[in-house]
Amino acid sequence: MDLPQAFYFKAGEPAVLLLHTFSGTPNDVRIMGRGLQKRGYTVLGPMFAGHGTADPRQIFKTGAPDRWWQDTRTAIQQLINEGHSEIAVFGESLGGLFAMKALAQFDEVVAGGTIDTPLFKVDTSRVAARFLLECRGWYQKMKLPTDEITKRMQYLSQHIDEMLTTIETFTGPVHDEIRGLTKPVFIAQADADELIDRDIGQRLADYLSSSAPVTYRHYPEAPHVMTFSPQGRQLTKDIGEFLEAVMPVNHPN
């Protein structure tokens, strides 16, 4: 079984960090990464701890918001160590939480943004239900015995709400950290988001726009994981144009 891997697409000096969703993998943003590389950006897509394994229980056993923030910090430091003095960080859903925190904390992170990221309190019941449904489907695809699937699903059911609450608790201070942010921010919102409130992107744009230059885009008929949808190509184009305006690549003559 081939499992997803982190990616590192090298190109020019300005670098982009792309952060994936909760329970997702760098494959969520891999196509976007290639699109931005074609525009001249070096693009890094790390894997959050506990993700990308054959068993979703690892998300709870080895992952947590503090650990995922450390994964983000490590990725940024890798880019800095390799000579990238200008970095943009974008995240899809959960990843956007860490992208915004990075904007607030790192001088080298000069721009960034979110894709369907709940930086305000939201109803997470649909997130939990989707997670459990997808995990059951994964275990069935692995052809595990029924009793083993039941055992694993019981574990996941017992831990998912606690994890989502932990993420929500982590989000509160980030909400405060980004107040007064002055760096350019790109915010993308799916109009057909089936997991979180569809006004969450506009609320974030309103929250930041008094101090930061905000580019807000919404995408009709796009689902929560927008990068995999037909609107993903337009999203990549929009982020590419945003980057070229705020963090241009210096192409050799």
Image: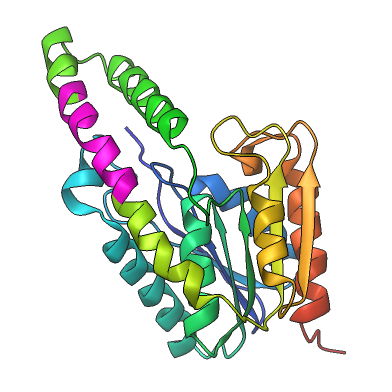
Classify 16 as above or below 231. Answer: below
User: What is the x, y in percent for residue 177?
Assistant: 49, 77
Q: Which residues are magenta?
A: 153-165
Residue at the spot 22% in from the left edge and 30% down from the top edge:
156
User: What is the x, y in percent for residue 244?
Assistant: 81, 74
Which image quadrant for residue 215?
bottom right
- The N terminus sits in image quarter: top left
Q: Please tell me whether residue 155 belongs to the stretch shown in magenta.
A: yes
Residue at the spot 74% in from the left edge and 34% down from the top edge:
230
Question: Is any atom of residue 95 visible in this view?
Answer: yes
Which image quadrant for residue 159?
top left
User: What is the x, y in percent for residue 76?
Assistant: 45, 78
Return the residue nearer the eye: 155 or 143.
155
Return the residue nearer the eye: 118 or 242.
118
Residue reaching furthest top?
146
User: What is the x, y in percent for residue 236?
Assistant: 74, 54
